[in-house]
Image (cartoon, rainbow, N blue to C red):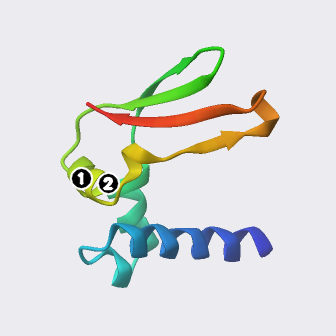
Amino acid sequence: MLLTIIASSLYRLLGAKVGNGYETAKSKLHIFRDLVNATANLGITKNEIIAHFHKRAHNPQLIVADFPNTDIRAPWLQDRRLRIKFG
């Protein structure tokens, strides 16, 4: 039950960050299908992990929401930086 509540809250946060109607989306499936369910190529170097997402119709919304400037350090992965790129 707790994981369901956490997942639901994370979908709402993602919808709020992207905006453009997603902040009031009635279905989490809509957010998942448009923004989350995507394939990417991963590159791992000594200092960073790069997720390069393939071209999709909804990528511009993620770009406007500033996801390419994500700067997250992953201490459990030798403090590598996560970078997100859209192709």
Q: Nearer the viewer, mark 1 or mark 2?
A: 2
Q: Is residue 48 left or right of residue 6?
A: left
Q: Is residue 39 left or right of residue 56?
A: right
Q: In the picture, residue 80 is in which quadrant?
A: top right
Q: Residue at x 25, y 30 (%)?
A: 87
Local secondary structure at mark 2: helix
Looking at the image, which is closer to me, 44 or 28?
44
Q: Residue at x 38, y 44 (%)?
A: 68
Q: In the picture, residue 22 is in which quadrant?
A: bottom left
Residue tagged by mark 1? 58
Pointers 1 and 2 in contact (CB under 8 A)?
A: yes
Residue tagged by mark 2? 62
Q: Is residue 2 above or below residue 52?
A: below
| Residue 46 point in image, percent of width and height | 66, 14
Q: Residue at x 59, y 25 (%)?
A: 48
| Residue 71 point in image, percent of width and height | 54, 45
The amino acid sitting under disc 2 is: Leu
Q: In the picture, residue 18 is in which quadrant?
A: bottom left
Looking at the image, which is closer to me, 81 or 62?
81
| Residue 53 point in image, percent of width and height | 36, 33
Task: Specify few, some or many for label 1: CA neighbours under 10 Å numbering under 14, 14-19, or 20 or more.
Answer: few
The amino acid sitting under disc 1 is: His
Disc 1 from disc 2: Cα separation: 7 Å
| Residue 9 point in image, percent of width and height | 60, 76
Local secondary structure at mark 1: loop
Q: Is residue 1 among the parts visible in the rendering?
A: no
